[in-house]
Amino acid sequence: MTKPVAFAFDLDDTLYLERDYVSSCFAWVAAALGRPSAKDALETSFDKGERDPIGVLCRQVGIGDHDKQKMIEDMRAHAPTISLLPDAAVLLSQIRERGLAFSIVTNGRSVTQRCKIKALSLTDATVIAVSEEVGAAKPDEAIYRPVIEAFPGARCVYVGDNPSKDFATPNRLGWLSVMRLHNGRGIHAQSIETPAEWRPQRTVAALDELADLISGVASDR
Ligand SMILES: [Mg+2]
């Protein structure tokens, strides 16, 4: 009997573009400050490589550290305007149509990652492992463990975008590791000039290329 496939996905720059999340944050901040035009200034500043565009803006408009921190906390809890990349949407609907399960394994703050997961309508994931909640971040094995425990005996597949943290542990655990190429649209570089054990076993330009992994396994569940 074919083993059932258990998909686990990274979130940022794998299922949606993190840059879109950044834009959503900038729009939220501009609205919170009552300065809609500030969104463009924040975008420009970010694209020029400024690491803290919101901090720069706050200094310019005379917002102190305390108020800035409060605003950033509220921003992290905003409902972001983001959407699944089209190929991710296709694969996820195929997975759901087949009655297969999927999981999310993501590094980040609980509040921001949960807001993204809700905005992307991914709350039906069987396992949602967020590093702040688990107390361990990729590549620590502890963050992948809930998936192993939820799907004993399954053929696990981890789909991510970042060779510096996503694939080493899935490789060691005997999972299939898959990197989605984002052709420069992602926040992080995708150099595979990393040791062999950190590299993905498979690379795809679009997630729906993984449809072969789900075909023929529906009867196993
Ligand atoms: Mg990522």
Image (cartoon, rainbow, N blue to C red):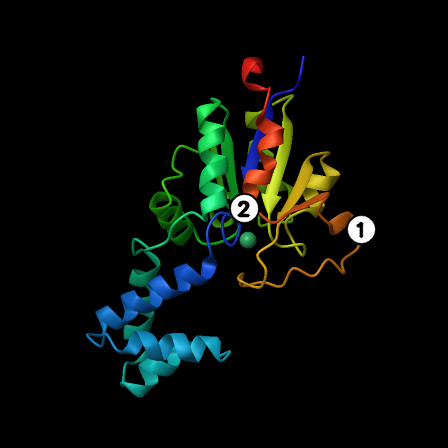
Secondary structure beneath disc 1? helix
- Going by the numbered disc 1, the residue's amino acid type is Ala
Image point (62%, 30%), residue name: 212
Mark 2 closeness class: few <14, some 14–19, many ≥20 residues within 10 Å: many
The residue pinned by badge 1 equals 196
Seen in the picture, residue 217 relative to 128 is either above or below; the reply is above
The count of marks equals 2
The residue pinned by badge 2 equals 10
Q: Position of residue 87 (x, y in %)?
A: 49, 44
Image point (57%, 46%), residue name: 206
Image point (28%, 65%), residue name: 28
Secondary structure beneath disc 2? loop
Residue 54 is at least partly visible in this image: no
Mark 1 closeness class: few <14, some 14–19, many ≥20 residues within 10 Å: few
- Does any atom of ligand 1 lie closer than 8 Å to the CB of label 2? yes
- Going by the numbered disc 2, the residue's amino acid type is Asp
Seen in the picture, residue 24 relative to 99 is either above or below; the reply is below
Q: Position of residue 155 (x, y in %)?
A: 65, 27
Q: Nearer the viewer, residue 103 or 148?
A: 103
Residue 75 falls left or right of residue 51: left
Q: Position of residue 153 (x, y in %)?
A: 65, 21
Seen in the picture, residue 37 relative to 91 is either above or below; the reply is below
